Image (cartoon, rainbow, N blue to C red):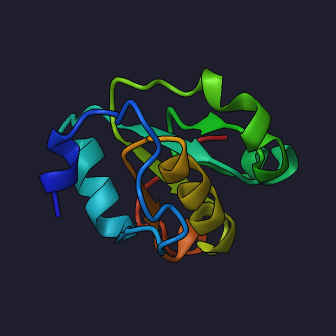
Amino acid sequence: MLEWLLGKRRTTPASGSKAKSNNISPADVLNLLQAGTKVTILDVREQQEFRSGHIKGAQLIPLGQLAKRTHEIRDDRPVITVCRSGNRSAQAARLLRGKGFEVQNMSGGMSRWPGKVAK
C-alpha cells in the first residue's frame, strides 16, 4: 500500500493515463495522517459540501475547476483525492495521473471517512 508514497511526481505524463486510478481505503488514509506522512489531501467536492465537513488540512479544488488549477497542487508529495462517495475523486485521480502526479483515490469518499471532520 505505501510503496507509492516513496515515489516523486513524474516529470512527464504517465503512460496509459486512461487506466483506472489506484484506490486507498479511508482507514489507510487516516493511518497515514496519524503517522504524520506528508501527503496532499485534495478534496474535489463543491465548496458547500466541503464546508459541511472535510478532512483537516485538505485542499479544496472542485472537480470542475481542477484541470485549470493543477498548478496549485504541491508536486513534492503524493496526492490523495477525496469526494463524497469516491466517483468524482476517481475522475480527479485519473486527470492528475495524466499530468504526472503520484495519486490515489480514497475509495468510498467522505461517506466512509472514519476520522474526525473539520468544518
Q: Depth check: give the residue in front, 33 or 19.
A: 19
Please determine whether, in this image, residue 28 is positioned above or below residue 8. below
- Identify the image quadrant of residue 25: bottom left
Q: Is residue 13 left or right of residue 9?
A: right
Please determine whether, in this image, residue 42 is positioned above or below residue 84. above
Point 68% across, 37% down: residue: 60
Q: Depth check: give the residue in front, 9 or 112.
A: 9
Q: Which of the image's four quarters has the N terminus?
A: bottom left
Q: Is residue 32 visible?
A: yes
Point 63% across, 23% down: residue: 71
Q: Is residue 117 visible?
A: no
Image location (x, y in percent) of residue 54: 61, 48
Q: Which of the image's four quarters has the C terminus?
A: top right
- Identify the image quadrant of residue 89: bottom right
Please determine whether, in this image, residue 26 is positioned above or below residue 69. below
Please determine whether, in this image, residue 53 is positioned above or below residue 40. below
Point 74% across, 41% down: residue: 67
Image location (x, y in percent) of residue 52: 76, 52
Image location (x, y in percent) of residue 17: 50, 61
Image location (x, y in percent) of residue 87: 65, 74
- Identify the image quadrant of residue 49: bottom right
